[in-house]
Amino acid sequence: WLLATIRSVEALDGYDVDPNAGNLTGPYYYGFEDGRSRVGDSAYEGNPTTILEALHRFTWDFGTWSFGGAAHVMFARRNNRYSILDFLPVISWHQALLQQVNMSVVLDARWDPLPGFWLAAQAGLDDFNAETFGMADNGATTIPAAVFGAGFGTEMGIGKLDLYLEAGYTHSLWGNYDGTQNYPLDPNPFLRMIYRYVVDGGSVLLPLTSPYGPGALWLRSSGELKPKVPGFSLGYELLILGKNAANLITTDFYADSAVLEASARTLYMSISLPLKWQEGLLLVSLDPELVVRDRDVGFQVSAGLGLRAGTVKGPGRP
């Protein structure tokens, strides 16, 4: 069970949601931490909003098989009027709710068929249209996401090898719910699945739903070889990512999702070959990387030199 607050600090570059979108005359029930009611506003008429994130997850372990189920929830209330039900696990999922939330449900499974080899999958729903079964609904479409992964690790004659492979997909509206058209008809962009990493002068916005936000299709792989040379490791990291026009700031939750899903995707690819060597407290790294975005190609190299501090093993110490 996780319950945490997210500071409502405006994005560093000013590209952010308007807390009181559609409400141009006030009163301004929502606001950034400093009291501004919308992006670029200097009147400080908004009510500083405290954003809450909650997660509850259950797991079942059957040895080589394990299963899990989770609900991921975002809360933001008018004038921060939270109720005790908002803070309780499990009961805050469905019928006990007094106010609306942005909730996604995720199921996951893992299988370890052989020593050192595992397979895993996650599948989630951010919304489900009951009209599929002939029941009245509010017009939102069904919003799925899924991730599949595999890992393998073994000891070989030349050293220890670890490999990882992942493929994922998120619907274009995944994480975009903002209270529009649902009771109490109170649009609230702070409900969108956005994490705000606070830095000097503002915050950096990061998706809480997937590594790449909504409208993403990706393949990622990485590996590391630790040969029998003390402190030395060689690896690779590969990412192939397709992103359509959807985003967590301006995409309308009730937009025509079929059009969004079919929109042109920006292709992004990167491959790097990180090289590391550590001797005692000294750490040296070199990471050349090739980057492709549509038809643009770039190359960069990162180099690092550092000291790592830690406890030293000695007689009678673990």
Image (tube, rainbow, N blue to C red):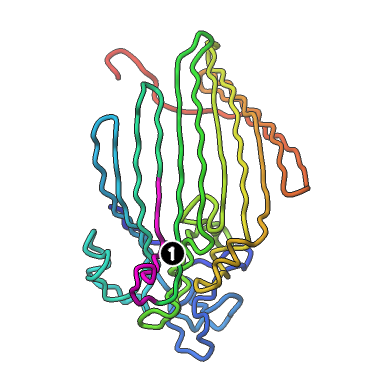
Q: Is residue 203 magenta?
A: no
Residue underneath mark 1 = 142
* Left or right of 183, for residue 145: right
Badge 1 marks a residue whose secondary structure is: loop
Residue 124 versus residue 180 in the image, above or below: above
Residue 303 found in image quarter: top right
Instruction: Give me the residue at 51% from left, 23% from top.
Output: 281
Q: Position of residue 180 (x, y in %)?
A: 45, 78
- Residue 33: where, in percent of width, then height? 47, 71
Along the line of sight, the residue nearer the viewer: 185 or 30 = 185
Residue at 35 percent of width and 81 percent of height: 183
Q: Residue furthest top?
A: 157
Quadrant for the C terminus in the image: top left
Q: For this view, does 128 lie left or right of residue 308? A: left
Dot 1: within a 10 Å radius of its alpha carbon, few (fewer than 14), some, or many (20 or more) residues? some
Query: How far across and how far down the image is residue 71, in percent?
Result: 32, 57
When the figure is inspected, residue 16 is found, relative to residue 155, above or below; the finding is below
Which is nearer the eye, 147 or 161?
A: 147
Q: Which residues are magenta?
A: 122-137
Q: Residue at x 50, y 54 (%)?
A: 170
Residue 124 highlighted magenta (yes or no): yes
- Quadrant of residue 115 in the image? top left
Question: For the view shown, which residue lies furthest in the front direction?
Answer: 134
Residue 306 image position (x, y, % from top left): 58, 29
Q: The disc labelled 1 sits on which kind of residue? A: Thr
